[in-house]
Image (spheres, grey):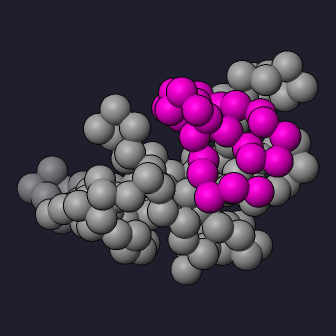
Amino acid sequence: MTNSGTLKVKIVIPKRQRYPVCTRRELDEARFLIRAIEFKKQPTSAIIFAFDGVAYAYVNHCMHMQRPLNCEQDAIFDETGQYLRCSMHGFIFDPKTGECQSPVCLGQRLQSLRLEEIDGILYFAEKHLTL
Protein backbone atom coordinates (compact mmCIF):
# COMPACT_ATOMS: atom_id res chain seq x y z
CA MET A 1 0.00 0.00 0.00
CA THR A 2 1.11 3.54 -0.70
CA ASN A 3 0.73 6.50 1.67
CA SER A 4 -2.49 7.47 -0.09
CA GLY A 5 -4.05 4.12 0.79
CA THR A 6 -4.05 2.75 -2.77
CA LEU A 7 -2.75 -0.70 -3.49
CA LYS A 8 0.08 -1.02 -6.05
CA VAL A 9 -0.14 -4.09 -8.22
CA LYS A 10 2.73 -5.34 -10.34
CA ILE A 11 1.55 -6.86 -13.59
CA VAL A 12 3.78 -9.59 -14.94
CA ILE A 13 3.48 -10.23 -18.66
CA PRO A 14 4.76 -13.68 -19.59
CA LYS A 15 7.58 -13.76 -22.10
CA ARG A 16 6.85 -15.33 -25.44
CA GLN A 17 8.46 -18.73 -25.93
CA ARG A 18 11.50 -18.56 -28.21
CA TYR A 19 12.75 -21.47 -30.28
CA PRO A 20 16.25 -21.37 -31.79
CA VAL A 21 16.29 -21.51 -35.59
CA CYS A 22 19.90 -20.99 -36.65
CA THR A 23 22.78 -18.59 -36.37
CA ARG A 24 22.72 -15.48 -38.50
CA ARG A 25 25.90 -16.69 -40.17
CA GLU A 26 24.25 -20.01 -41.18
CA LEU A 27 21.36 -18.09 -42.73
CA ASP A 28 23.63 -15.67 -44.57
CA GLU A 29 25.56 -18.59 -46.06
CA ALA A 30 22.44 -20.50 -47.20
CA ARG A 31 19.97 -19.72 -49.98
CA PHE A 32 17.23 -20.65 -47.52
CA LEU A 33 16.59 -22.99 -44.61
CA ILE A 34 13.69 -25.31 -43.90
CA ARG A 35 12.69 -26.21 -40.34
CA ALA A 36 10.05 -28.70 -39.20
CA ILE A 37 7.52 -26.95 -36.96
CA GLU A 38 4.04 -27.24 -35.57
CA PHE A 39 1.92 -24.20 -36.34
CA LYS A 40 -1.48 -23.94 -34.70
CA LYS A 41 -1.04 -27.58 -33.63
CA GLN A 42 -0.54 -28.77 -37.24
CA PRO A 43 2.76 -30.31 -38.42
CA THR A 44 4.31 -28.29 -41.23
CA SER A 45 7.58 -26.58 -42.11
CA ALA A 46 8.93 -23.07 -42.12
CA ILE A 47 11.09 -21.37 -44.73
CA ILE A 48 13.71 -18.97 -43.41
CA PHE A 49 15.76 -16.75 -45.68
CA ALA A 50 17.56 -13.41 -45.85
CA PHE A 51 16.42 -10.81 -48.35
CA ASP A 52 18.08 -7.38 -48.62
CA GLY A 53 19.94 -8.18 -45.40
CA VAL A 54 16.79 -8.89 -43.36
CA ALA A 55 15.77 -12.33 -42.05
CA TYR A 56 12.24 -13.53 -42.89
CA ALA A 57 10.26 -16.66 -42.06
CA TYR A 58 6.98 -18.00 -43.42
CA VAL A 59 4.95 -21.16 -43.04
CA ASN A 60 6.09 -23.15 -46.05
CA HIS A 61 2.69 -23.43 -47.78
CA CYS A 62 1.48 -21.84 -50.97
CA MET A 63 -2.13 -20.82 -50.34
CA HIS A 64 -3.23 -22.17 -53.73
CA MET A 65 -2.88 -25.89 -52.97
CA GLN A 66 -1.18 -25.97 -49.55
CA ARG A 67 2.04 -27.34 -51.04
CA PRO A 68 5.51 -26.32 -49.82
CA LEU A 69 7.06 -23.60 -51.97
CA ASN A 70 10.00 -25.91 -52.67
CA CYS A 71 7.93 -29.06 -53.37
CA GLU A 72 9.13 -29.47 -56.99
CA GLN A 73 12.56 -27.83 -56.85
CA ASP A 74 15.15 -27.10 -54.20
CA ALA A 75 14.51 -23.36 -54.57
CA ILE A 76 12.14 -20.74 -53.17
CA PHE A 77 13.06 -17.72 -55.33
CA ASP A 78 12.21 -17.08 -58.97
CA GLU A 79 14.93 -16.72 -61.60
CA THR A 80 15.29 -12.97 -60.88
CA GLY A 81 15.87 -13.53 -57.17
CA GLN A 82 13.31 -10.81 -56.41
CA TYR A 83 10.23 -12.93 -55.63
CA LEU A 84 9.45 -16.04 -53.67
CA ARG A 85 8.04 -18.65 -56.05
CA CYS A 86 5.97 -21.77 -55.58
CA SER A 87 7.78 -24.41 -57.61
CA MET A 88 4.55 -26.30 -58.37
CA HIS A 89 2.48 -23.62 -60.14
CA GLY A 90 4.81 -20.65 -60.37
CA PHE A 91 2.85 -18.30 -58.10
CA ILE A 92 5.09 -15.48 -56.92
CA PHE A 93 5.15 -13.62 -53.61
CA ASP A 94 6.75 -10.45 -52.28
CA PRO A 95 9.51 -11.76 -49.97
CA LYS A 96 9.11 -8.82 -47.55
CA THR A 97 5.34 -9.13 -47.04
CA GLY A 98 4.45 -12.61 -48.32
CA GLU A 99 1.76 -11.04 -50.52
CA CYS A 100 0.88 -13.03 -53.62
CA GLN A 101 1.54 -11.21 -56.92
CA SER A 102 -0.17 -13.82 -59.14
CA PRO A 103 -3.75 -13.16 -60.37
CA VAL A 104 -5.36 -16.32 -58.91
CA CYS A 105 -4.57 -15.34 -55.30
CA LEU A 106 -3.61 -11.68 -55.70
CA GLY A 107 -3.43 -9.95 -52.32
CA GLN A 108 -3.48 -13.10 -50.20
CA ARG A 109 -0.41 -13.62 -48.03
CA LEU A 110 1.85 -16.38 -46.88
CA GLN A 111 1.65 -16.85 -43.11
CA SER A 112 4.57 -14.91 -41.67
CA LEU A 113 6.44 -16.16 -38.61
CA ARG A 114 8.02 -13.76 -36.16
CA LEU A 115 11.80 -13.96 -35.82
CA GLU A 116 14.02 -12.35 -33.21
CA GLU A 117 17.79 -12.10 -33.34
CA ILE A 118 19.70 -12.20 -30.07
CA ASP A 119 23.51 -12.29 -30.01
CA GLY A 120 23.73 -13.62 -33.57
CA ILE A 121 21.14 -16.38 -33.09
CA LEU A 122 17.73 -16.29 -34.77
CA TYR A 123 14.72 -17.51 -32.81
CA PHE A 124 11.10 -18.14 -33.69
CA ALA A 125 9.07 -15.92 -31.35
CA GLU A 126 5.60 -16.95 -32.48
CA LYS A 127 2.88 -17.89 -29.99
CA HIS A 128 1.23 -20.51 -32.26
CA LEU A 129 4.49 -22.29 -33.08
CA THR A 130 6.27 -25.22 -31.45
CA LEU A 131 9.14 -27.41 -32.59
Residue in front for this viewpoint, 28 or 79: 79
Please give the name of the residue rendered at 40% of the width and 70% of the height, measured from the top-left corner: 21
Main secondary structure found in the magenta portion? loop
Residue 71 lies in quadrant: bottom right
Residue 25 lies in quadrant: bottom left
**Left or right relative to 16: residue 97:** right
Q: Quadrant of the C terminus?
A: bottom right
Residue in front for this viewpoint, 11 or 63: 63
Q: Where does residue 51 sit, x and y in percent of width and height?
A: 40, 38
**Left or right relative to 29: residue 43:** right
Q: Is 25 above or below relative to 69?
A: below
Q: Quadrant of the N terminus?
A: bottom left
Residue furthest out toward the left? 3
Does residue 19 appear in this view? yes
Q: Is 100 above or below relative to 22?
A: above
Residue in front for this viewpoint, 44 or 34: 34
Please give the name of the residue rendered at 73% of the width and 75% of the height, measured from the top-left corner: 43
Q: Is residue 109 magenta?
A: no
Q: Where does residue 88 sit, x and y in percent of width and height?
A: 82, 48
Q: Where does residue 97 sit, x and y in percent of width and height?
A: 55, 31
Q: Is residue 75 magenta?
A: yes
Does residue 98 appear in this view? no
**Left or right relative to 110: residue 125:** left
**Left or right relative to 1: residue 115:** right
Q: Is 13 above or below relative to 51?
A: below
Q: Where does residue 72 sit, x and y in percent of width and height?
A: 76, 57
Magenta extent: 72-97
